[in-house]
Image (cartoon, rainbow, N blue to C red):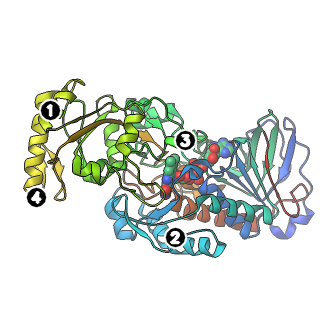
Amino acid sequence: MTVGMKLTERLVPASRAREVPVVAAAQDVDEVRRVDVVVVGSGVSGSAAAMTAARRGAKVALLEKQAAFGGSAALSAGMFWTAPSVDAYRKRIPLGNVDLGSRLVGDYEEALAELRAAGVHVAAEPKRGIMTFGIGYSTDIHGILAWCRDQVLGAGGEATAGVVVTELLREDHAVTGVLVRTADGRRVQYEASAVVLAGGGFQGDRAELTRSIGPNADRLVLRSNPGSVGDGLRLARSAGAGGTTAMSTFYGHLLPYPLRSFDTENYLPYSQYYSGSTVLVNLEGKRFADETDGDELLNQAVTFQSEARGILIFDEFVRSTEVLEEPFPGLGSIDRLGVAIDAGALHASAPSLPELVDIISGWGVDRDHLTRTLDRYAEVAGAGGGTADGIAVAATARAPQSGPFYAVMVQPSITFTFGGIRTNARGEALDHDGGAVPGLFAAGADIGGLSNYGYAGGLAPGYITGRWAGTSAAERAASFVPNTRNAVGGRGSERNAQ
Ligand SMILES: Cc1cc2nc3c(=O)[nH]c(=O)nc-3n(C[C@H](O)[C@H](O)[C@H](O)COP(=O)(O)OP(=O)(O)OC[C@H]3O[C@@H](n4cnc5c(N)ncnc54)[C@H](O)[C@@H]3O)c2cc1C
């Protein structure tokens, strides 16, 4: 047991559930509640896990620490996408967990069909080439989240916001529930057959980020809901679950530098999605990545450059096309350079490249290095691609050639972490030896290895891994049904505990 109270009830087989005595009054807690499945976090993965468990007959408590439901999913653009095939997954994410990746790709159509059947908006036509390789459909993410909660409530469960899950309850080696702190300081104990961790990753925990990523983790701008601070990983470790590789890799987009302010409504418009069509140099005036890798990979590469800064250099052609275009439906066609300038970014424009280089050298960038970098890039790109100063130049690369020319300074951000809790493709949390931790499941950005440097998507993987965890959690609850005398009955309740 991890809290100062005595839990007298053990999980018992369903057939014996009625014979089991009610949970004894717990000490040191203000209230004891009994459900089948607790889900920690109400983003897309927690909502999907809770919905799935509820539709399989489980009484679910969906618990959210913030005042509002939805996590980063509620801030997202709603593009429900992932790799179009296992081969594409392997190619784009060679370091990814192929077991997880294969099942993710295999379950994608079924997940879409489930959403369509639920009546939430899913675009009729797919968008291809997302993040250079993915396939996806525009969705009403708020509709998805609301539908999931409604399934939970309809099955007699609860969805409560404003409560922080602080500890896992354990009996022997099994996870048997959670301890929760409400906004007014009450301690509530939820006893359950299964707990699903869906806290959204550890991007908000600077200490864990610094351990995993290195010193420049301090410079990553948080582009996430503020509640994902690694609770899931900490809770999982406390129950003996292991971690994964990919701990130093993450998803985010390049943002203007500096920024006067950065609020949730700036997350989408400030993202410099078009960086793959520019020449990206560091403060030494040198390239360090193949720009056509795409913005979410360049964002990680910039993190490891001096002062975690980069400079995008491009011409009028790029400015009048890629900079203005909507990367995918829902993001809007806006002038992302104009938005960056308004946001406070260091920027320049000039009629010729040498004049632009002059201005950039005033930012402390070595003029000779930068001139050589741009010359070599133009040479290699003009020859159909190859390598310039040791860095790949793609066959599709296009050097800046039609003035005016532009430069904008950028910095990396972090939306969620790719490393996390070790799980299998049933959503079971695994210990360091690969054995399942009884009663513990995880989903979404809390699990590690599905994306690793390469990015497999956020919403679809969150929804689909949530279904895995919800299914397994419901199965466990069905075979070990705890006493339900304290459970919420009839149609459940959605509330805010603050
Ligand atoms: C601006 C933006 C745009 C995006 N656009 C897209 C897109 O179009 N397509 C896409 O695929 N992905 C997109 N993403 C990424 C996507 O939103 C995430 O990958 C996805 O939401 C992760 O789902 P999750 O359920 O794991 O975490 P989240 O959705 O972040 O939810 C986690 C929740 O857990 C809660 N929580 C954490 N700890 C506790 C605790 N101890 N107790 C209770 N609750 C807790 C948090 O408060 C949070 O609400 C976007 C993200 C952002 C920020």
Mark 3 lies within 8 Å of ligand 1 (Cβ measured): yes
Determine the secondary structure under disc 3: helix
> What label sits on residue 364 in the rendered view?
none
Looking at the image, residue 223 sits to the left or right of residue 4; the answer is: left
Mark 1 lies within 8 Å of ligand 1 (Cβ measured): no
Q: CA distance from mark 4 to mark 2?
A: 37 Å
**Badge 1 is on which residue?**
355
Looking at the image, residue 347 sits to the left or right of residue 350; the answer is: right
Q: CA distance from mark 4 to mark 1?
A: 26 Å
Determine the secondary structure under disc 1: helix
Residue 152 on image: x %, y %: 75, 62
Is residue 437 visible from the viewing direction of this image? Answer: no
Residue at 82% from the left image edge and 62% from the top image edge: 156
The numbered mark, 4 or 2, whose residue comes first in the sequence reads 2
**Badge 4 is on which residue?**
384
- The amino acid sitting under disc 4 is Gly
Q: Residues within 10 Å of mark 1 (few under 14, many from 20)?
A: some
Q: CA distance from mark 2 to mark 1?
A: 46 Å
Which of discs 4 and 2 lies nearer the camera? The answer is 2
